[in-house]
Image (tube, grey):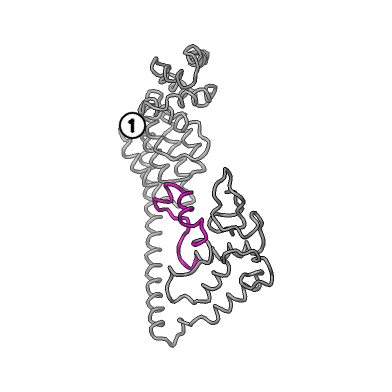
Amino acid sequence: MYQYGTLGYAAPECYSKATDNSKFPFTVSFEQGKMSIESDIFSFGATFWECLNIFEMVTKNKEFSDDIHEFYRNNFLNDNTYFNRDLSCTSSYYHKKLEAIIKKCTRKRTNSYCDLDNKDYYHSYKELRKDIENARDSAPTIVKEENPKVKNAFNLCGSMLSLFSVFLAIYFIFRIMAFNVAEGKWGVVTSNYNDTQFYKLEEVAESLITTAPANRIDDIYAKIAGFTYKNDDISEYEAAMLVRLLQQIDNNDLLPERVDEIMRNANTKKFKEISTEIVKLDVIGESVGYDLAKAIFNVEVGKSNITAAYEILEKYKDNIDLRNAVIKLKNSLDNDKNISIIAEDTGLSRLEIKALFEEISDKEVKE
């Protein structure tokens, strides 16, 4: 379906007709694709319902991750579950008036749901707010100080909150101290570094990343990577260290650029091993380095996706920034078996395929 709004929260009238003769999931008693204030109120009701249920409609369970569309189709895209939402999953202490408000917000549509005289639906925020305030004022008070059980409960909560605050303060103090210690160790290790000290360097680098304040993590990684790249071509061990650090940082915005840096500084004799490490990352966004690394990995390690790797080579054949990786991919593909697979899948002749390899080789000689 086409929709205006988030699936599960948008009112049913916000969905327009499905394509390819797909079945529309709701009983159609409204104008599809028409949005109104009633549509906004429906979304408010759905959100309010989720807050009170302490329940996310979009969960991370296996069914959702396997097939998102099937998950929605089974759990939400039908009249029985999408409309008239109740609070049956919540504590019995919730006031019934809140449930009545949510049911009215998310009520199943009729032909007259936009009719101002139809009191089964809300037609203004003023009316909705009035009902919410009324529910608040008429709800059974469970916080009166004269109630001993409630008073004791609040005292216990206060004590627990104080204790938690103390532990939180100790934790942050420990993090700051640990980060300062790690910075000191980094200075010692890097001041007189040689390759035999790599494992100590790796240990200190991971300590820096895990203890660094959130606003400094990206700068700390840049400092570690910059030092690593000073040693000319990085080894597969250094690449593995940088990949592990990137996995801990989990910054998708900078990840493509950082992967390109690793491939740009990679030891040309270790592209296979370094590519094996890089494909462990889940890179979102445009990254030439990741595309080349994945293609090299598929050809060298997986012995698969040969034609896809050839297409990557063709796409980046003129890339100067990652020239060494392009040459490595070309060399990996340049054998009779791979050429036969590419020719069969693409319909190209062997001469045409070899011509691309020779074009890249000629550029390599000129450079």
Is 289 displayed left or right of 210 in the figure? right
Residue at x 41% of width, y 51% of height: 63
Judged from this view, the residue extending furthest toward the top is 351
> Considering depth in this image, is 242 or 141 the residue closer to the camera?
141
Say which element carries label 1. Answer: helix
Residue 64 among those drawn in magenta: yes
Residue 66 makes an appearance in the image: yes
User: Is residue 140 or residue 196 the one in the foreground?
Assistant: 140
| Residue 159 horizontal/vertical position (percent) | 38, 75
Find the magenta span and give its range. Answer: 51-80
* Magenta-drawn stretch, dominant element (helix, strand or loop): helix
Percent position of residue 322, x then y: 49, 26
Amino acid marked by disc 1: Asp
Residue at 62% over, 51% down: 16
**Considering depth in this image, is 255 or 10 the residue closer to the camera?**
10
In this view, 176 is above or below 258: below
